[in-house]
Image (cartoon, grey):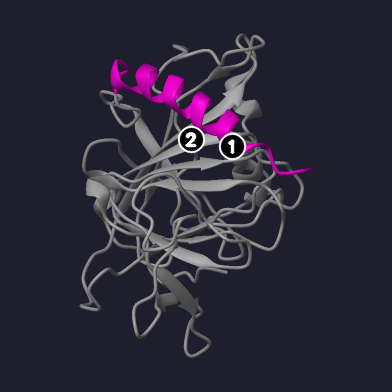
Amino acid sequence: MRRPSFPALYALLGLALLGLAGAPAAAQGGDREFRFGANPEAWEGVSRPLPPSAQRVAPPPQGENVLQPYAVAFAEEYAAVPEMVRFTPEFMVVVVQEGYFGLDAGDGEEALVVFPAAGEPIPFMTERSDAAPFYELVSPPSFVQAAGGGDCTTACPVPPGTVVQVKPGDRVVAGEGALCVWCLLNANGVEKDETGLLEVFPLLPPRGNLDEFSWVRAWDASVPSSAAPPPATTRSVTRGWASRFNPPTSCR
């Protein structure tokens, strides 16, 4: 798929953020529970995307599709949303609520734009190959560059073939089909219970099945289909997902 024009994405993001400002947080769900994946091959430690309700948010400028909110919790360091293989990711807006993430832009042409919180630049990361594969900040520090030169602090297109770090408050616009491997990382190098939370707003049909979201379909497909599959772990929406699981997962 060809890269959509960035002006069109910016216009849609502006409308989306207007809708998000008045929408309930996707993580709010009363006594509902996240269900965490238990397959070490994919989605381990990542919750099945949870919609707060059937409520839709803001429609795009054209067409009838809408931005549907989901909450996605990460229960341990290196838990990751993997590359989509069987299901094409929709256009989506992602808001980082908790945790620091490595965001892999892949090598494709699909647009991936970060709107950083607090006007801070977006640092590049590199993948480590020792022990478990995960990402670390580039040394010396290097940041996504603005079109006119200098560190980008607003509407930052992520170059293909790179990995960047995103933090709480950052908003990410991902074009349809973008790679977007999300991996929860330890932000300061100190071992501790690392958890994360994303609010994900894919562009979906207005009255479609909420389980048709590509992340939901991929998560469901990762559950073993044998007669006695290992059960996914359930935890409360409020604090239960903060528990740490073993063994630790890797970002790939």
| Left or right of 89, for residue 135 | left
Name the residue located 30 percent from the left edge and 26 percent from the top edge. Answer: 25
Name the residue located 49 percent from the left edge and 84 percent from the top edge. Answer: 128
Whether the magenta-drawn stretch holds residue 12 is answered as yes
| Span shown in magenta | 1-24
SS at mark 1? helix
Residue 188: percent from left, percent from top: 22, 73
Q: Amino acid at mark 2?
A: Val
Q: Amino acid at mark 1?
A: Val
Q: Quadrant of the N terminus?
A: top right
Q: Which residue is mark 1?
A: 216
| Left or right of 54, for residue 217 | right
SS at mark 2? strand
Name the residue located 56 percent from the left edge and 33 percent from the top edge. Answer: 7
Foreground: disc 2 or disc 1? 2
Residue 113: percent from left, percent from top: 50, 46
Q: Which residue is mark 2?
A: 93
- Which residue is nearer to you in this view: 248 or 106? 106
Compared to 248, does 155 lie above or below?
A: above
Q: Residues within 10 Å of mark 1 (few under 14, many from 20)?
A: some
